[in-house]
Amino acid sequence: MLPARWVVRRATARRTGAAARPDDQLHSDLQSANTTPEFSYIIPDNCSNGHDAVCAANNLSGGFGTGADAQTPNPPLNYTGGTYAESEFLSHVVPEIEASPRSQTTA
């Protein structure tokens, strides 16, 4: 699970309106095509969006755990921000979305 400072905004045809949710909901939502929103807007924090040159928080440089902890970030190896932190964030989130059942069934 990604740190709770990221928020996912979800709006789908199956739901009324939009809901702001912590990103730890994203992983469980992606496990089934029925729970994956048709539209998600993911807002990373100022470290993971490339804004901060030096991150005060976890920039995901330590990678993630294994097995049951595969969604839990390890402590950071450094506090580099900018495009480095941006790439770390995207290299985790994009493959998770692409591997989801909904992504496998839509063109």
Image (cartoon, rainbow, N blue to C red):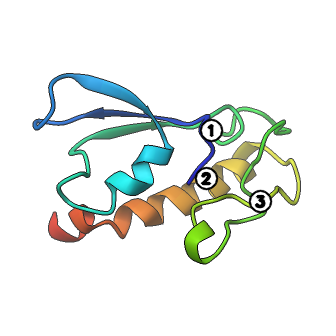
17 vs 67, nearest the viewer: 67
> At 31% across and 34% down in the image, what residue appears?
10
Quadrant (top left, top right, bottom left, bottom right) of the C terminus:
bottom left
The numbered dot on residue 89 is 2
Numbered marks: total: 3
Indicate whether 2 appears above or below 98.
Answer: above
Q: x%, y% of residue 87?
A: 64, 55
Quadrant (top left, top right, bottom left, bottom right) of the N terminus:
bottom right
Q: Which of marks 1 and 3 is in front?
A: 3
Indicate whether 73 appears above or below 58.
Answer: below
Left or right: residue 83 compared with residue 56: left
Indicate whether 53 appears above or below 64.
Answer: above
The numbered dot on residue 61 is 3
Query: What residue is pinned by disc 1?
Result: 49
Q: x%, y% of residue 34?
A: 17, 55
The numbered dot on residue 39 is none
Q: Which residue lies furthest to the bottom in this view?
A: 67
How many residues crowd around disc 2 within 10 Å: few (fewer than 14), some, or many (20 or more)? Answer: many
Disc 2, SS: helix
Which picture quadrant has residue 69?
bottom right
Amino acid type indicated by mark 3 = Ser
Disc 3, SS: loop
Q: Earlier in the sequence, mark 1 or mark 3?
A: 1
Q: Which of marks 3 and 2 is nearer the N terminus?
A: 3
| Cβ atoms at labels 2 and 1 below 8 Å apart | yes
Left or right: residue 7 compared with residue 102: right
Amino acid type indicated by mark 2 = Phe
How far, Cα to Cα, is label 2 from label 1? Answer: 8 Å
> At 20% across and 22% down in the image, what residue appears?
17
| Cβ atoms at labels 3 and 2 below 8 Å apart | no
